Amino acid sequence: MKVLGLETSCDETAACILESPRRILSNVISSQIALHHEYGGVVPELASRRHVEMMGPVIEESLTRAGCDLTSVDLISVTVGPGLLGSLLMGVTFAKTLSYAIEKPLIGVNHLEAHFYAPFLEDPELKFPLVSLIVSGGHTLLVWVKGLGQYEILGCTFDDAAGEAYDKVAKLLGLGYPGGPVIDQLAQKGNPKVFRLPKPYLSKNSLDFSFSGLKTAVLYLVKGYGSRNTGSTPFKKGRIEDLAASFQEVVVEVLTKKCMIALEKTGVENLAMGGGVAANSRLRERLTELAQKKGFHLSLPSKTLCTDNAAMIAALGLARFEAGLPGEPLEANPKLKIRHMHLIPLR
Ligand code: KG4
Ligand code: ZN
């Protein structure tokens, strides 16, 4: 069975051909980073227009690379939410039209749920149940993934998402958009112990996140306030690598600590990651060290499968289709929630 996956929830136009059970025949991603760079963030109107232009060529490229044509597609799987309304509308409308034209079934999937499935595409040893850390520009979630369609949210962010904190800190340091990869690079040349920044753990054993105070602390340092109160070294322009490293160390420490608490609370032995921040080199390094030390199974997808892609959309669509589970309603839904999710009371 061949599945055409389509993803347009934000600023990536992506198409993939997946052959069951999980062989990626092609995985094409057209990024809009250059388009949005000068605005310091994604401009929704520009994003949806670019999706319209790119969808046809991206699908054609995915078919060519997979060595097949539309007649060999058995199922279409498309992201219906959450994301930007205009961007989602473009993908859903295109998928509906294509499904009608080639007379093949169409399944709608949740973008976040698809991030839980991306690690399975490369890691044959990964099994349910697992704890999934989803860290992107729009989301920071710790989820107990018990099986297909069985999820419990363990924690989420109260304010900024982890990637959003990277992007905002990069913006205030004049480093452009997206900020994560730039800060990641700079931090490799810096000393993480130079600047003292608050570590937002929230209450003891809390699995929720809050990154806006950390971002404000960086802002104050850069503006020259407060270093006397916190005892931190005052910021000077020449120390941007040290500031990047100090900021990143706090983010990584908070994320990894909460992952360890989640594994302990649930008794689960598998940890997987998804979302753009999962591509962060220090986060990957630290989790790898902890997995070796504590003996849990760590599944780190390649960077292409961490960031937004259509392979994970095809994989989830196929899994739901084969299991006889319903897809999402075939309407763009920017605020789509994950079904069968429950909030675990914090202890
Ligand atoms: O999952 P993604 O591609 O798109 C969504 O937000 O849905 O994630 C993009 C986010 C951006 O905030 C970007 O700054 C961050 O992921 N990011 C990183 C790295 N690469 C991308 N953050 C930290 N380190 C990285 N290497
Ligand atoms: Zn995403």
Image: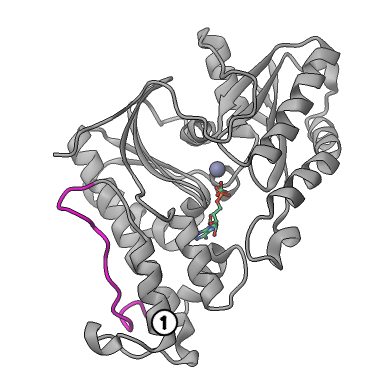
Quadrant (top left, top right, bottom left, bottom right) of the N terminus: top right
Q: Mostly what secondary structure, the magenta segment? A: loop
Near-viewer residue (158 or 12): 158
At x 50%, y 35%, the residue is: 112
Residue type highlighted by circle 1: Asp
Out of 286 and 310, give the one closest to the viewer.
310
**Where is the C terminus found, in terms of image quarters?**
top left
**Any part of residue 8 in sight:** no
Q: Is 245 in front, or is 80? A: 80
Q: Which residue is mark 1?
A: 242
Q: Specify start and end residues of the magenta stretch as a single range.
A: 190-206
Residue 119 located left or right of residue 251? right
Dot 1 falls on a residue whose secondary structure is helix
Residue 93, picture quadrant: top right
Query: Looking at the picture, does residue 71 appear above or below residue 125?
Result: above
**Which residue shows up at 34% across the image and 50% down it?**
158
Residue 78 on image: x %, y %: 66, 26
x and y, in percent, of residue 130 in the image: 34, 32
Direction from residue 176 to residue 54 in the image, left or right: right
- Based on the displayed image, in which of its 4 quarters is residue 314 positioned? top right
Is residue 103 placed above or below 2 in the rendered structure? above
Residue 268 magenta-highlighted: no
Q: In screen coordinates, is 201 left or right of 159?
A: left
Q: Is residue 77 left or right of residue 170?
A: right
